[in-house]
Amino acid sequence: MSSPAPRPNPSTDPGPGPDSLADAAPPLPAGTTVAGLRDLAVSLATEAGELVRTGRPARVTVAATKSSDVDPVTAMDRASEALLRRRLAEERPEDGILGEEGDDVVGTSGLTWVLDPVDGTVNYLYGVASYAVSVAVVAGPPEPERWTALAGAVHSVVDGRTWSAGLGEGAARDGEPLAAGGAASLATSLVGTGFGYAAERRAAQARVLAAVLPRVRDIRRLGSAAIDLCLVADGALDLYYERGLNPWDMAAGALVAAESGAVVTGLRGRRAGTAMTVVGAAPVVHDLVALLEEADADGAAEGA
Ligand code: IPD
Ligand code: CA
Ligand code: CA
């Protein structure tokens, strides 16, 4: 697994603040448009999704484990990423690649494709329906708190739904425009979240969950962060939060959520990133941010 680049120090570099639709697209390479990048993201995610769907054996086995014994990689994670890398080498040879299962490719165009070849690998392993291929392209450093996400697509493998977004161009599910709504209050919000693979992190996440659960309608842990983010855009979740996301978990889904009108943010004025990602429609999302800040959900006490 490739490691994300070092993150900025929030005490010295607070970043440009929560994502908003006011983000402007930076200058793009000649002949490149956001719409063209979005189309390519959709076709790559769909093509890899077809491989994941048709190539799933009756009994999936674990090829290796990564960050812990419960963090699996399967042959399909690798095959899907290989397909995506092969197609990008053909279509966008000057762009960089940050993919979960391979080495970083440094490009010359200023754009980087951020790939999660199977998001929801534990679901894929067990045959639980929520897993996806996530493909995004970003400008600038390939770090969530510093990049400008330009386009992305999340293809849900089992049911074939594809969410996509382009910066300044809105979000859609299978061509249907999306506008995030959300519940009237935190107390009536259905909240998605997820957990990391390290025991210490999970213990910390459980403590935060104990503070959140009594304050909301209910919690869903569906098992694919990329899909969870799109479900906020789609109205199937009101809110979502998770600590410890990797760039590839969130690159496409966070853009889909932001372009649907949802707020995508971190805590204490930081942008969304590994430390914390909170998503949902204003104003209720700010109540969740306040609750998570109070619970110190991104703090040292809650696990590194
Ligand atoms: C995981 C899923 C899960 C989230 C974890 C991710 P993976 O990705 O998105 O929902 O809670 O934080 O690591 O390992 O299945 O690609
Ligand atoms: Ca993932
Ligand atoms: Ca993955």
Image (tube, helix red, strand yellow):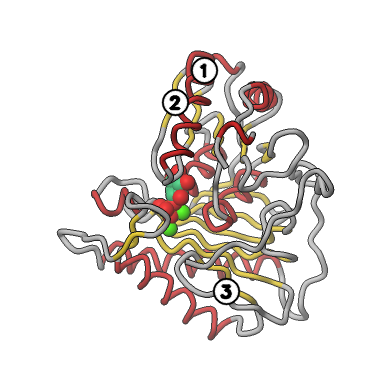
Percent across and percent down for residue 5 are 65, 63
Q: Is the CB of mark 3 within 8 Å of ligand 3?
A: no
The Cα atoms of the two marked residues, 3 and 2, are separated by: 35 Å
Give the labeled residue for mark 3: 104
The answer to whether mark 1 and mark 3 are in CB contact below 8 A is no
- Residue flagged by tag 2: what amino acid is it? Ile
**Secondary structure found at label 3:** loop
Q: Nearer the viewer, mark 3 or mark 2?
A: 3
Please tell me in which quadrant of the rendered image residue 109 appears.
Answer: bottom right
Nearer the observer, 166 or 117: 117
- Residue flagged by tag 3: what amino acid is it? Asp
- Residue flagged by tag 1: what amino acid is it? Val
The answer to whether mark 2 and mark 1 are in CB contact below 8 A is yes
Up/down of 1 relative to 242, above or below = below
Q: Residues within 10 Å of mark 1 (few under 14, many from 20)?
A: some
The Cα atoms of the two marked residues, 2 and 1, are separated by: 8 Å
Give the labeled residue for mark 2: 219
Q: What mark, if any, has residue 216 been given in the picture? A: 1
**Secondary structure found at label 2:** strand
Q: On the rendered structure, is 169 left or right of 116? A: right
What residue is at 40 percent from the left and 68 percent from the top?
48
Which circle's residue, 1 or 3, is located before the other in the chain?
3
Q: Nearer the viewer, mark 1 or mark 3?
A: 3
Specify whether residue 13 is in view: yes
Q: Is the CB of mark 2 within 8 Å of ligand 1?
A: no
Count of marks placed on residues: 3
